[in-house]
Amino acid sequence: MQRIRRSSGQTLNLLRALMDQPRKWHHGYELSKATELLSGTLYPILMRLSDRGFLEHKWLESQEAGRPPRHVYRLTAKGVKHADEQFEISDEVGAGAKSSVSRA
Amino acid sequence: MNWFASLCMQFAAWLMRHERGNWARAMRAEFQYVSTPDRLSWAFGCVIAAIKQRLVPMDTGNFRISRGVMLVETLGCFGFLTLGWYAITFGSFGLLRFDNATIEKVFFGYPGGPFLFWVMVASIVVGLVGPIGLFLGLRYVLQGRALTNRAVGWSMIGATLGLNVVGTIAGYFVGPADFHVMPSLTLLMVVLPVAGVLHLMYLARPAAPPPMLATA
């Protein structure tokens, strides 16, 4: 059986932001605002998700004249499945922790 | 402050690993859309992201760094030893500037003096690791040639470590009364040069072939 690795809280936040509207393309600044992650944390996570095939990205021409194209991101089908698994694990861990606290 | 943030973005793009060039362009493009109050923290973050990307391959045991980073490493690893070697050899208190009478008076007039004299003599010989390492490191930066001669590499490492071990032990027995090991000096004159030589030897090894692509 393949063991699923639990993602960090920051990665979970990012996955939640991306899953908010899974078919929509998100840009970096928007994700940074939504997750409150600084660019120094956000981009390495995006790169890692992309390396693992969970994230697709493309360049999108800007609507405003004179502005450069933007790099935008959304989860792949594999990424959506991974996000769901991670949310489940996170919920289980959260429920386990809650019951331990109430027992104590 | 906008110019400083732009400068940081340029630095981040320069620092980013070559394979991540697309991501560096993405961060720079996004910077154009970041609101003014957030621009500096965004730029600093991008520098950190680039540094993290530099560290990722090292974390997995791959120390094949770019020539630009090697320049910094070379200066850090061999610069201090080279300066120290120059100072004790040709500097104003360098051994080559002393005549016999001065050496007799300065080193052989009190307990522990002869020990200092012989440590200085040995350091002049062994300290050559500094300028040699500096030369080899800069050669790698300019020509991409690492240290292929392993005998030279191990001799440099052995001489540096040997002098440090023998000198420390001898210092406690025949050195001056206030003899003690200075960790910062050991780091600059022994640990960093040895690490630098090891890295130059590692870079001479053939790179691992890229992993085979899986076929359907």
Image (cartoon, coloured by chain):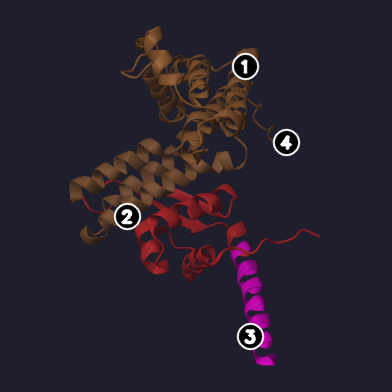
Asked which secondary structure carries label 1, the reply is: helix
Dot 2, crowdedness within 10 Å: few (<14), some or many (≥20)?
many
Q: Mark 1 points at which residue?
A: B155
Disc 4 secondary structure class: loop
The chain carrying label 4 is B
Query: Could you tell me if the residues under marks 3 and 2 are in contact, i.e. CB atoms within 8 Å?
Result: no
Amino acid on which the number 4 mark rests in the picture: Thr
Q: What stretch is highlighted in magenta?
A: A82-104
Pointer 3: what residue?
A: A98
What percent of the width, then of the height, locates residue A58? 43, 48
- In space, the residues marked 1 and 3 are separated at their CA atoms by 61 Å
- Tag 3 and tag 2 share a subunit: no
For marks 2 and 1, the one nearer the N-term is 2
Q: Which residue is drawn at 43% across and 14% down?
A: B104
Measured as percent of width and height from the top left, residue B102 is found at 37, 13
Residue B93 vertical placement versus A64 (above, below): above
> In the rendered structure, which amino acid carries the disc numbered 1?
Ser
Say the numbered circle drawn on residue B215: 4
Q: Quadrant of the N terminus of chain A?
A: bottom right
Q: Chain B is drawn in which colour?
A: brown
